[in-house]
Amino acid sequence: MVSEFMLVEVAYASEEDQLIQSVQVPKGCKAIEAVKRSKIKNFFPEIDIENAKVGIFGKGCTLETVLNPGDRVEIYRQLKIDPKDARKK
């Protein structure tokens, strides 16, 4: 019997803490669905899910990207300072 579900991870790191949540999602699931199902916002209420920048294993994607088994959706924080400006200082 072929499973209709797959296991993916959702990851987020604040300045103080980090969390990787494993979550079972239906095949064909989009990144935004996995983020919502992970309930990661319960741990990090500052996450704006609808406007979050995300990636899969460090490669940027959209919230509409369809996931594959084993993918890790990473939610990125807003930068406090532009890296170019930081290097100049």
Image (tube, rainbow, N blue to C red):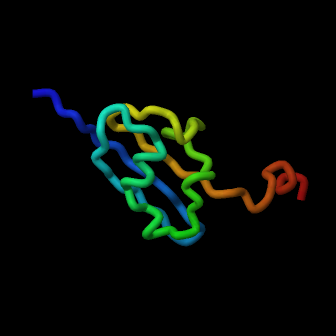
> Horizontal and vertical percent for residue 61?
57, 36
For image coordinates 46% across by 53% down, the residue present is 11
Q: Quadrant of residue 49?
A: bottom right
Question: Compared with residue 2, is residue 23 higher up or lower down, i.e. above or below?
Answer: below
Question: Compared with residue 80, is residue 37 higher up or lower down, i.e. above or below?
Answer: above
Q: State left or right for residue 68 relative to residue 61.
A: left
Q: Quadrant of the C terminus?
A: bottom right
Q: How many marks?
A: 0
> Horizontal and vertical percent for residue 62?
57, 38
For image coordinates 31% across by 43% down, the residue present is 25
For image coordinates 83% across by 56% down, the residue present is 86
User: Closer to the camera, 32 or 19?
Assistant: 32
User: Closer to the camera, 64 or 80?
Assistant: 64
Q: State left or right for residue 17 relative to residue 4.
A: right
Question: Compared with residue 53, is residue 56 higher up or lower down, i.e. above or below?
Answer: above
Q: Quadrant of the N terminus?
A: top left
